Every structure is written in structure tokens, then in C-alpha cells.
Image: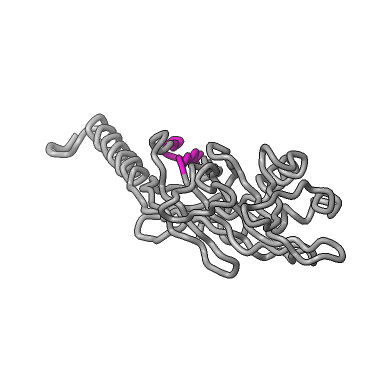
């Protein structure tokens, strides 16, 4: 054998070290954090019922949870600090989504992304409604209802704080998996569609609803865990099913 040439064992060792080096680089890349903005909005794509009009939503954002299943690099999951709120947001009809916070999420191809939102009490420094004691609730949806043969009256859908909404995310085309790549800007948008939720509630629920009265005799309808309970339970069930999470 000619002197100075590496033997087969040296060659094997070099190849193994090279493969390990490439593998290490690949694993490191899968830990790179990518900034993902978190926003919440009200989906207004549905056609409203002729007898009910929803004009605004007030959301108290509590804890946020995430579960991500990646094709490579291991799964990712987190929950924000329990009890810590992320603010109260007023979204009127026709207004865009509200930025809430951001998260650093490892890059990768996600076969599944699941997001969870827990409501928090509405901050009365941001929004206050004495008729409903709005700071006792986590989500307030305000509108008006037009009874047959009568003038319209305010209607309030009042969702308890600590109520949890969750769903799986898709990309902007409604597809999965979702690729998160370093150097690219992303937003996760959580949207509820109260108009769609109301579509499945018979008008009879509103026609037969108990009516409340303010100090000056003004009439309004409360739909909550304590008032018009059947309508509340149906609305909450349908509202949870309208939640969409979209990565853009």
C-alpha cells in the first residue's frame, strides 16, 4: 500500500463525522425561533338575519395555549401564565382584527397546530356598560333585535369569563400542513363569527325571551348563563363551532 494514503477506517471515521455534523446542523435549525403575531377578530362574512343586527364585540383575553406537532424536530407546546390577562379589546362591526401579543415558535413543518383561548373578565377601564355589569363577563356581543310589529330593542350576549375556545389552525388557503420558516413574518388570527352562531337560533327564542328593564324603564334582552338560558346555551355551543385559526 502506498504511504500517506488514508486507510479505510480513517475514511469511514471522516464520513461518520460529516454525517453527524450535518445532522447536528439540521437539528439546530429546527430550534430557530420564528416570531408569530397573535391577533383576535370577529368574522363578519355571514349574512345577518333580518330581525337581528350585531354591532360590536368586547373580548377579555386571558391565557393562550398552543400545541404543535412537527414532522421533524419534536412537538411544541406552551400555555401562557394562568391568571395573566392579555387585555380587553373592543371590535365594532366593520373593524379589523386586534393585535394581542406575539410568540416565538420553532420553525418547521407542522402537521397540526392547535390554539386555545381562555376568556378573562372585561376590563372596565377599557369598556364599561352599567346595564350589563360588563366587567363580570369575558365576552360581550351587543346588537339589536326587532320584534314583529315593535321597535327594535338592544340585545346582549354575555359569555362567562374562563370560558375556553379551541380549534386547529390552517394556512390562508384552509390547508395543512403549515410551514413556519425563519426570516418570514407570520400572524395567527383567531376569529369568532357571532352572526353565524345566531343564524341557527330560531326567532322564537327571541320572540319569547324574558325582557329586562333599566332604571329609566328602557327595555333590553340579556342572553347569559342566568337570563334566557336556553338561548344562551345554544348560542355558546354554536359560537364555539365558528372559531377559526388561520396562519397568514
Q: Is residue 188 visible?
A: no
* Colour mode of the rendering: one colour
Total of numbered circles in the picture?
A: 0
Residue at image location 86% in from the left, 51% down from the top: 204
The x, y position of residue 115, in whole percent, is: 53, 43
Q: Is residue 66 magenta?
A: yes
**Main secondary structure of the magenta stretch:** strand
The x, y position of residue 92, in whole percent, is: 56, 65
Q: Which span is picked out in magenta?
A: 62-78
Q: Residue furthest top?
A: 9
Q: Is residue 8 visible?
A: yes
Horizontal relation, residue 126 to residue 205: left or right: left
Q: Residue furthest front?
A: 216
Q: Residue furthest left?
A: 4
Residue at image location 58% in from the left, 42% down from the top: 166
Locate residue 2: give its quadrant. top left
Q: Quadrant of the N terminus?
A: top left
The x, y position of residue 100, in whole percent, is: 42, 54
Residue nearer the viewer, 91 or 71: 91
Residue at image location 75% in from the left, 62% down from the top: 52
Q: Residue furthest bottom?
A: 94
The x, y position of residue 199, in whole percent, is: 78, 56
Locate residue 163: give its quadrant. top right
Q: Is residue 233 magenta?
A: no
Residue at image location 75% in from the left, 65% down from the top: 152
Horizontal relation, residue 211 to residue 133: left or right: right
Residue nearer the viewer, 48 or 129: 129
Q: Is residue 95 above or below residue 180?
A: below
Amino acid at each position: 500500500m502506498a504511504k500517506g494514503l488514508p486507510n479505510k477506517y480513517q475514511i469511514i471515521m471522516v464520513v461518520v463525522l460529516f454525517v453527524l455534523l450535518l445532522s447536528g446542523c439540521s437539528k439546530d435549525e429546527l430550534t430557530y425561533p420564528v416570531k408569530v403575531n397573535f391577533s383576535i377578530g370577529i368574522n363578519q362574512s355571514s349574512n345577518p338575519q333580518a330581525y337581528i343586527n350585531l354591532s360590536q364585540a368586547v373580548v377579555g383575553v386571558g391565557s393562550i395555549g398552543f400545541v404543535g406537532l412537527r414532522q421533524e424536530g419534536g412537538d411544541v407546546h406552551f400555555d401562557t401564565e394562568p391568571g395573566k390577562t392579555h387585555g380587553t379589546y373592543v371590535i365594532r362591526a366593520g373593524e379589523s382584527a386586534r393585535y394581542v401579543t406575539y410568540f416565538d415558535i420553532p420553525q418547521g413543518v407542522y402537521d397540526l397546530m392547535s390554539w386555545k383561548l381562555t376568556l378573562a373578565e372585561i376590563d372596565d377601564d377599557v369598556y364599561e356598560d352599567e346595564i350589563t355589569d360588563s366587567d363580570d363577563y369575558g365576552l360581550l356581543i351587543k346588537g339589536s333585535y326587532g320584534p314583529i310589529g315593535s321597535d327594535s330593542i338592544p340585545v346582549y350576549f354575555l359569555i362567562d369569563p374562563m370560558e375556553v375556545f379551541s380549534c386547529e389552525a390552517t394556512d390562508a388557503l384552509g390547508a395543512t400542513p403549515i410551514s413556519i420558516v425563519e426570516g418570514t413574518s407570520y400572524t395567527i388570527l383567531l376569529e369568532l363569527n357571532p352572526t353565524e352562531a345566531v343564524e341557527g337560533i330560531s326567532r322564537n327564542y327571541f320572540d319569547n325571551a324574558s325582557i329586562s328593564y333599566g332604571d329609566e324603564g328602557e327595555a333590553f334582552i340579556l342572553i347569559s348563563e342566568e337570563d334566557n338560558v336556553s338561548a344562551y346555551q345554544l348560542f355558546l355551543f354554536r359560537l364555539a363551532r365558528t372559531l377559526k385559526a388561520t396562519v397568514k
